[in-house]
Amino acid sequence: EAGVVQSPRYKIIEKKQPVAFWCNPISGHNTLYWYLQNLGQGPELLIRYENEEAVDDSQLPKDRFSAERLKGVDSTLKIQPAELGDSAVYLCASSEGGAEDTQYFGPGTRLTVL
Amino acid sequence: AQSVTQLDSHVSVSEGTPVLLRCNYSSSYSPSLFWYVQHPNKGLQLLLKYTSAATLVKGINGFEAEFKKSETSFHLTKPSAHMSDAAEYFCVVSDHGGQNFVFGPGTRLSVLP
């Protein structure tokens, strides 16, 4: 069984440029998560989807971040414009059901903003 | 709201000696608790999870954790450390009130030869 797929694995951009990350969850997993992980810290939730509905986006900085999961399968997270402080690893995870279910993580996208 | 405290940011042990990584949590509901491991440049991997069944949970690679409600703890242990155990370990709490995963800050485990 394929795991959670993320691309790209690494991205280097200059500040004020846009950037997008893509995630394909495990087949059959209805819930998809985007996390931000700063160096030396634990992941922090940005947004959670149940199917195509964003059920928790309270931690998503909506002035510059957006996300979509149009068909309830793969998802895209976008930053526009990027700032220096956005440099981090962006993790995608998926689970079969609710918040108490095991989450399976992708390898992440390491973003560097210059 | 739930929260997680990992009391040690860094633990160093010698190969072949026991490992103890401490985790305390707070939760308004009956929690589910998880330990994940993250090797450098690798994705987070589930070690074990507790979801209100047996309080002693056995995971992969010889790790286990014991849920102690009275102490609000979920410490991770392994009888004998191996060099390949060197990684970052995260304790995670999720409650059944519909809240999401909350990660602890992580404990970096070093294993000395």
Image: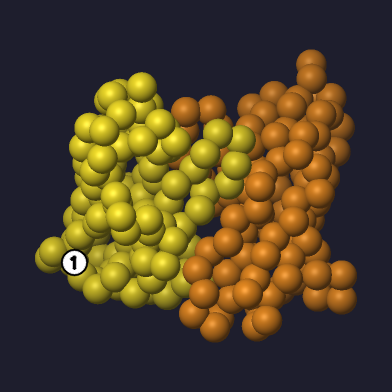
Chain colours: A yellow, B orange
Say if residue A68 shows up in the picture: yes
Residue with the mark numbered 1? A72
Residue A110 in sight in this render: no
Q: Is residue B1 left or right of residue B54?
A: left
User: Which residue lies at the image location 80% right of the left edge and 25% below the top edge?
Assistant: B15
Residue A111 x %, y %:
36, 31
Q: Nearer the viewer, residue B20 or B58?
A: B20
* Residue B82, x across and y down, in percent: 72, 29
- Rendered position, A25 above or below A48: above
Callout 1, which amino acid?
Gly
Quadrant of the rendered image containing residue A12:
top left
B112 vs A36, left or right, is: right
* Chain ID, mark 1: A
Choose between B16 and B29: the one closer to the eye.
B29
Give above or below for B49 relative to B44. Answer: below
Outermost residue on the top side: it is B113
Corner quadrant of residue A41 = top right
Residue positioned 78% across, 46% down in the render: B21
* Residue A79 in picture, x, y percent from top left: 27, 44
The residue that appears at 67% across and 65% down in the rendered structure is B3
The number of numbered badges drawn on the structure is: 1
**Local secondary structure at mark 1:** loop
